Image (cartoon, rainbow, N blue to C red):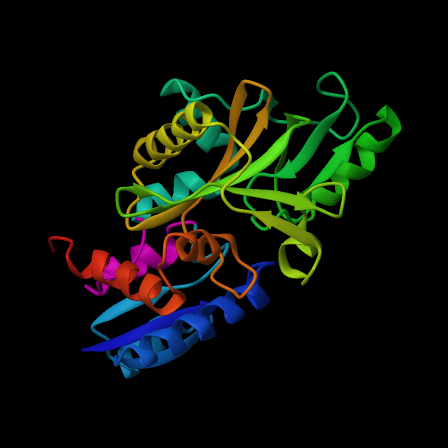
């Protein structure tokens, strides 16, 4: 069996995708698999025609990996793949549609406004302006003063459409899902204003606390919400659900269908807490995809 690890692409997360992909490819080789690495470009259909694979391990962060595009291509070419399907991927990368489904499923998420105008303040301060279709905190600004709004929208709009979300001043936590299991809760303490791109991918910029500083009742409650969100968006194999917790209030911020798999990423750290080393984690994700009915 030949496994194609797909990474790279053309999103703002390209460099992180390459880091994740190369590390995943190395892990699979360590476990004895025949692996081919594919840096995804616009010619990906021709590349896959010339380099036949039995299954694709998708490590493309952002578009075209997390928006359903590559999944649709692989299904057209009858190539199995890891992770969520076309619909789930397309919904989860769109933060506005994610929030609508969360709310319709009874899952709490911060209040938001969409669409937003660069000329009109959309809600009470403070709030965040976010790109609708980006990950890794790319293009996000916390707006604390009205005169910051215009530049925040302009910045987010560099990556497409944008929306406003109420700023929650609380603990930032994240929960990885592996199969039907919620991994230990990771609490993130960033040295920056929030867990932004720099804090995510710069050594020493974020403190990881595992397990998070939550009591047993809150821990169980948050894990159940994470699993419910994963299911509501029809995610599969693995995902990562991000939260803000303010006292007793719990808010789902977003769901990542292809979480980072670098040395500094959250999901591997959570798995390691329960004795699942990196290589084993990667193989388990692969096995979940292989066990899926065709």
**What residue appears at the point 52 percent right and 30 percent down from the top-left corner?**
214
The relative height of residue 156 versus residue 102 in the rendered view (above or below) is: below
The relative height of residue 9 versus residue 112 in the rendered view (above or below) is: below
The answer to whether residue 42 is visible is no
Where is residue 77 drawn, in percent x and y? Answer: 23, 65
Quarter of the image where the C terminus is located: bottom left
Quarter of the image where the N terminus is located: bottom left
Instruction: Residue lying at the far front in this picture: please name it.
Output: 216
Left or right of residue 27: residue 201: right
Where is residue 181 drawn, in percent x and y? Answer: 29, 43
Where is residue 289 drawn, in percent x and y? Answer: 22, 58
Residue 282 placement: quadrant: bottom left
Left or right of residue 243: residue 80: left
* Part of the protein shown in magenta: 67-84
The answer to whether residue 281 is visible is yes
**What residue appears at the point 27 percent right and 47 percent down from the top-left corner?**
179
Left or right of residue 130: residue 32: left
Where is residue 13 drawn, in percent x and y? Answer: 57, 59
Instruction: Residue lying at the far left in this picture: please name it.
Output: 293
Which of the two residues, 148 or 231, is positioned nearer the viewer here? 231
Which of the two residues, 182 or 147, is positioned nearer the viewer here? 182
**What residue appears at the point 57 percent right and 23 percent down from the top-left corner?**
110
The relative height of residue 15 versus residue 65 in the rendered view (above or below) is: below
Which of the two residues, 157 or 129, is positioned nearer the viewer here? 129
The relative height of residue 43 versus residue 153 in the rendered view (above or below) is: below
**What residue appears at the point 43 percent right and 20 percent down from the top-left corner?**
103
Residue 92: say if magenta. Answer: no
């Amino acid at each position: 069996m030949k496994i194609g690890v797909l990474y790279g692409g053309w999103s703002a997360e390209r460099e992180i995708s390459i880091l994740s992909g190369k590390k995943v490819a190395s892990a699979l080789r360590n476990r004895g698999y025949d692996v081919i690495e594919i840096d995804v470009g616009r010619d990906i259909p021709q590349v896959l025609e010339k380099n036949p694979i039995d299954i694709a391990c998708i490590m493309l962060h952002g578009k075209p990996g997390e928006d359903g595009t590559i999944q649709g291509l692989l299904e057209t070419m009858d190539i199995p793949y890891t992770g969520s399907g076309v619909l789930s991927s397309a919904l989860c990368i769109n933060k506005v549609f994610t929030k609508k489904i969360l709310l319709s499923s009874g899952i709490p998420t911060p209040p938001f406004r969409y669409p937003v105008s660069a000329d009109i303040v959309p809600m009470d301060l403070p709030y965040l302006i976010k790109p609708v279709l980006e990950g890794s905190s790319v293009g996000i600004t916390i707006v604390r003063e009205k005169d910051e709004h215009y530049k925040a929208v302009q910045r987010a709009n560099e990556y497409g459409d944008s929306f406003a979300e109420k700023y929650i001043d609380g603990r930032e936590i994240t929960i990885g899902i592996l199969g039907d299991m919620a991994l230990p809760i990771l609490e993130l303490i960033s040295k920056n204003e929030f867990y932004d791109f720099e804090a995510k991918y710069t050594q020493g910029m974020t403190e990881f606390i595992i397990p998070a500083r939550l009591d047993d009742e809150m821990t169980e409650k948050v894990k159940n919400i994470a699993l419910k969100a994963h299911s509501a968006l029809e995610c599969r194999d693995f995902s990562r659900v991000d939260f803000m917790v303010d006292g007793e209030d719990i808010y789902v911020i977003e769901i990542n269908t292809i979480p980072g798999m670098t040395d500094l990423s959250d999901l591997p750290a959570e798995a390691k807490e329960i004795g699942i080393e990196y290589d084993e984690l990667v193989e388990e994700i692969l096995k979940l995809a292989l066990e899926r009915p065709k």
